[in-house]
Amino acid sequence: MSEGHGIGARVARKEDKRFITGLGRYTDDMKVPGMMHAAFVRSPHAHAKINGVDKSAALEMEGVIDVLTGPELKADGIGDLICGWAVSSKDGSPMNMGAWSPLATDTVRHVGNPVAIVVAETRDIALDAAEMVAVDYEPLPAVVDAVDALGEGAPQLHPEAANNLIFDWEIGEEQATDDAISGAAHVVEVEIRNNRLSPNPMEPRAALGHYNKAEDHYTVWTTSQNPHVARLVMSAFYNVAPENKLRVIAPDVGGGFGAKIYIYPEEVVCLWASKRTGVPVKWVATRTEAFLTDAHGRDHSSTAKIGFDADHKIVGLKVETVANLGAYMSLFSSATPTYLYATLLSGQYNIPNIHANVKAVYTNTAPVDAYRGAGRPEATYLVERTMTQAARQLGVDAAELRRKNFIREFPHQTPVIMNYDAGDFEASLNAAMEEIDYKNFESRRQESRNRGKLRGIGMSCYIEACGIAPSAAVGSLGAGVGLWESAEVRVNAAGTIEVLTGSHSHGQGHETTFAQLVHERLGLPLDQVTIVHGDTDVVQMGMGTYGSRSGAVGMSAIVKALDKVEAKAKKIAAHLLEADEGDIEIENGELKVAGTDKTLPWFQMALGAYTAHNLPEGLEPGLKETAFYDPSNFTFPAGCYICEVEIDPETGKTEILRFVAADDFGNIINPMIVEGQVHGGLTQGIGQALLEGVHYDADSGQLITASYMDYCMPRADNVPMFEVSHQTTPCPGNPLGIKGCGEAGAIGSPPAVINAITDAIGTEAVTMPATPMKVWQAIRGAAMAQAAE
Amino acid sequence: MSEVTLVVNGRKVKRNVEDRTLLVHFLRDELDLTGTHVGCDTTQCGACVVHMDGKAVKSCTVLAAQADGSEVVTIEAANAGYDELHPMQKAFKEYHGLQCGFCTPGMIMAGIDMVRRYGPGNLDEATVRQNLEGNICRCTGYHNIVKAILAASDEMAKSDTRLNEAAE
């Protein structure tokens, strides 16, 4: 740690000032001269044919500029939305992707499916006019459950996908796994339901499209986690405009959690509508629109079968999963329930044989894609619920069964692609058990019992894969893009620095942590370092922020660019100080000749680079370097979470008394920010376990949970103060030894909570969200079953 | 249309507004005070909290016409009477009570109101959590928001005599 501002320091955030004074600039805060407002006409049906659209009444309204529909969009050559990750079925056939027009032309497939855009002088007029657009729908039967959608006679969504099956994918050796389990001393089978969630960043999605006729150029301000990917996809696949004619700006973005990775119909349509109408067009989602159309997360139905030998060592794990992908394939929807899910089914354990089969299915619901954790929460929930239930059935302690099966040697090749590079799983387990005082739990249980309450303890030992890289590896698995990151370090003539990054901050604090890295390397004060991101005209290219990749991949790119900057700076300084280049050291904002008192202030070196009056022979003037960094492997954050709950058996209400998180994120740049990421992730995971669930009516396909009245977000009094600690094994795969911390909390916490609840009530018959009603029913059900015996 | 006259952040403003115009849209669209945010449609997220005649209100649930004649303070003027920042704003930064920043203006305005209602230094963790029922944050898990509000409350008890008098 250098002077309290470098790597490892708890630096207060540089970006906070604008947010705490109301001067943040989000997409909805943008105004462009002549700007008009858009509202979308959306399907009220889960599934219907469109026989016609009558927009005449809307067009007659005062203040309405235009109403545009799908056929007009298609006539202008705007392409269908695509999934950018090709996943094949086990028989080798490509995935069955149905067409997704940004505005529906002949069929709508979920409630909220956009049919037309209304552009008007005010938002209120646009909303009123949208009500006046008469769409002639012919309702069709709908199906919302993925298992139902695979059944005989189920309504069919896309002609491309027979039986609504998108792919039937597998990983691992099936025969070897079956053999191992059939020869096992103990076999435990569990059914796992991973509930459907809505990510709910607090800032609703928005887009402001502005077509400049004179330049034939488009600009869109949008709520994106990855503006460059948005530009690439809108150019290469959706025919909006060539990349040099399309600028994508993601200004301050109010949370993402995955939901803002994807390119949605609305931003494409706003850009196109701006050209059609000749005015800038802004759309801002209502919260109900967010529930209807933001990509949802999870929604898996699985069975798991795990075999143990007589010594309780795992011999094999077999998993069958049905994944609901909704009505259309979102941008990375195919990867989430396959390569981001089944590749983590080995958990922290030495499992010699694993086989997983995943069927991805269309239903008449919103598209499903990556939400904080993306596949890894589903894997962790399955593995950690299975381990705890196995421990109970085997009559052994949950911690000891895990300990017995931990991977202890690294690198470790699992049977499902992943090669774990480093870790110390026992260190996190021990830290968490110590912190929560695991050994004295039974006395606390008794104390609760004396008060008529049921107390339970539950743990989860998670591992995840972050970084989502290297490019060649993800390419071989079907990714349509490379997953590296870029950085440009610009040293200005007076020595201040701008770092241009392809990562995007929407709450993660990059403006602070990335500056801390520069301070660590050069010793310049933080206020002389500015981090620039989120604008495709300013930053050349980047892959954005998701998969906890901005530290491990984004900062590594900055390291590589800084290496080049330092090398050139040393050449210049050596020349000016008449010293050998190899003797120059950079420290505290100065370049020094080692072993002497000769120094050159950083700014004088920079000035020298730009005046170019006295540079080494052949050296170019200026000081600006770029790097594209492609990692050598995924990173593997891991940890142990232990949760203690108390349940009122009369109401079924669960209170989380304590939650202990012991994480190994590798090296940490800013512990304050890392802890904040953990707190937020834990709360989302606790939300999944106790409160949240997207619910569609099975018959009508209507979304029941379409507002905060019906979808229960975690509030401040649903969660305790979290007890967070770190155990560190540096990641060997990147120069900073970082693993990533953005998703761990959401990945590891749901099974810890449910393992605690099921421990308290003595039955496994609880699904997420474990609402008071469900817990109460489980308690009563168990009591009745016992009475019947 | 109605003519409304109100004082916003110490400045008198007069506008003609549609009857259905919400205070939050009046502030954002008419006055360009975009620090006040809209995060839901059902008066639950609290991103739009402002102070109206000294009390916290959700500006998505007040018509601009209802605010006629009132005095409104938004996040942009939360520090009025203080130095650069209100103690609540300082505490949110110091305790990392924000990440994406979208709920933050509402949280800060709600936090200031909480201290006003209970009196500086009179808050405890359970009270703060209960009083945040109407403010949703998706980033922080509330941990550091609760710490920030408690710290600001204690700080104001030490240094802010005006509020002590008001509470008495």
Image (cartoon, grey):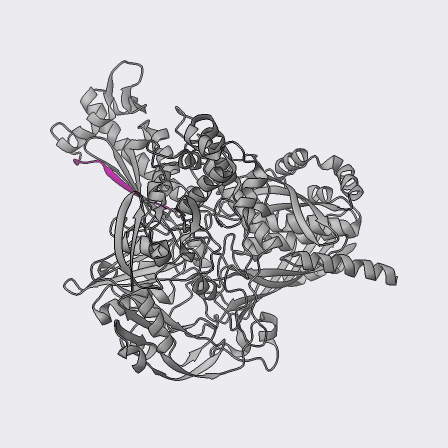
The answer to whether one can see residue B43 in this image is yes
Residue A778 lies, in percent from the top left, at 74, 59
Q: Farthest residue to the right: give it.
A: A789
Can residue A674 be seen?
no
Left or right position of A22 against A689: left
Specify the farthest residue to the left.
A613
* Magenta residue span: A620-631
Tell how many labels.
0
Horizontal side of A232 relative to B160 (left or right) equals: left
Q: Specify the quadrant that holds the C terminus of chain A.
A: bottom right
Q: Is residue A533 above or below residue A581?
A: below
Q: Quadrant of residue A240?
A: bottom left
User: Looking at the rendering, which quadrant does residue A591 occupy?
Assistant: top left
Q: From the viewer's perspective, is A238 left or right of A137?
A: left
Q: Residue A145: image x %, image y %? A: 58, 71
For the point 56% across and 39% down, which residue is it?
A663
Q: Nearer the viewer, residue A324 or A623?
A: A324
Q: Position of residue A715 (x, y in %)?
A: 54, 49
Is residue A520 part of the magenta span, yes or no? Answer: no
Residue A16, image x, y percentages:
37, 39
* Quadrant containing the N terminus of chain A in the rendered view: top left
The front one of A132 and A165 is A132
- Res A22 quadrant in image: top left
Above or below, A429 against A66 in this view is above
Q: Looking at this view, is A449 or A235 the one in front? A: A449
Q: Is residue A326 above or below residue A428?
A: below
